[in-house]
Image (spheres, rainbow, N blue to C red):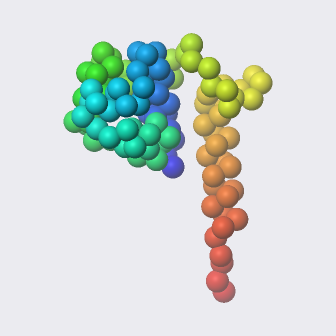
């Protein structure tokens, strides 16, 4: 997982929730599948520019707001944040945990 993918996914989710849309609503409006949007929100995929344009239009947001790596303060509750942890701290923690898990699953052949 790439940090840019994670940040984009978090921004997309934040914008979607602020707009009061479900994944199904946004998928219909942006002409995409809900499963594809889920993959984006989880940071597993990064959409092409034409898809970002459709998402931005559906959300009523400028394209640049979605692709900027700046994280805006959010009224959305991230229940998986630890006390005093910022969103960036969470992203870094999740990336480190994933890297440790991948390293533990890697078999080294001599």
Q: Which residue is the extreme one toward the left? A: 50
Relative horizontal placement of residue 15, taking residue 31 as reference (left or right) = right
Q: Position of residue 4 (x, y in %)?
A: 46, 39
Q: How many marks?
A: 0
Q: Quadrant of the C terminus?
A: bottom right
Task: Name which quarter of the figure residue 35 lies in.
Answer: top left
Residue 2: image location, x then y, percent: 49, 46
Direction right: furthest residue: 83
Task: Name the residue at 63% across, 52% down.
Answer: 98
Q: Is residue 64 visible?
A: no
Near-viewer residue (47 or 34): 34
Q: Position of residue 109 (x, y in %)?
A: 64, 83
Query: What is the quadrant of residue 55 in the picture?
Result: top left
Q: Is residue 26 above or below residue 100?
A: above
Residue shown at 37% from the left, 43% from the top: 36
Residue that appears at 65% across and 34% down: 90
Lateral position of residue 95 relative to residue 30, left or right: right
Against 99, residue 27 (above or below) is above
Is any part of residue 2 visible from this angle?
A: yes
- In the current view of this chain or complex, which residue is farthest to the bottom? 110
Residue in the foreground of this view, choosing between 33 and 84: 33
Vertical relation: 48 (above or below) 102: above
Residue 1 percent coordinates (x, y): 51, 49
| Residue under the image location 41 percent in, 31 percent down | 23
Indicate whether 32 appears above or below 100.
above
């Amino acid at each position: 997982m790439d940090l840019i993918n994670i940040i984009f996914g978090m921004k997309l989710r934040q914008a979607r929730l602020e707009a009061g849309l479900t994944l199904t609503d946004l998928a219909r409006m942006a002409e995409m599948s809900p499963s594809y949007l889920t993959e984006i929100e989880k940071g597993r995929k990064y959409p092409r520019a034409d898809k970002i344009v459709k998402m931005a239009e559906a959300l009523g947001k400028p394209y640049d707001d979605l692709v900027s790596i700046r994280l805006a303060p959010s009224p959305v509750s991230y229940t998986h944040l630890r006390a005093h942890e910022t969103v960036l701290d969470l992203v870094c923690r999740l990336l480190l945990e994933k890297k440790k898990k991948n390293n533990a699953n890697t078999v080294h052949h001599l």
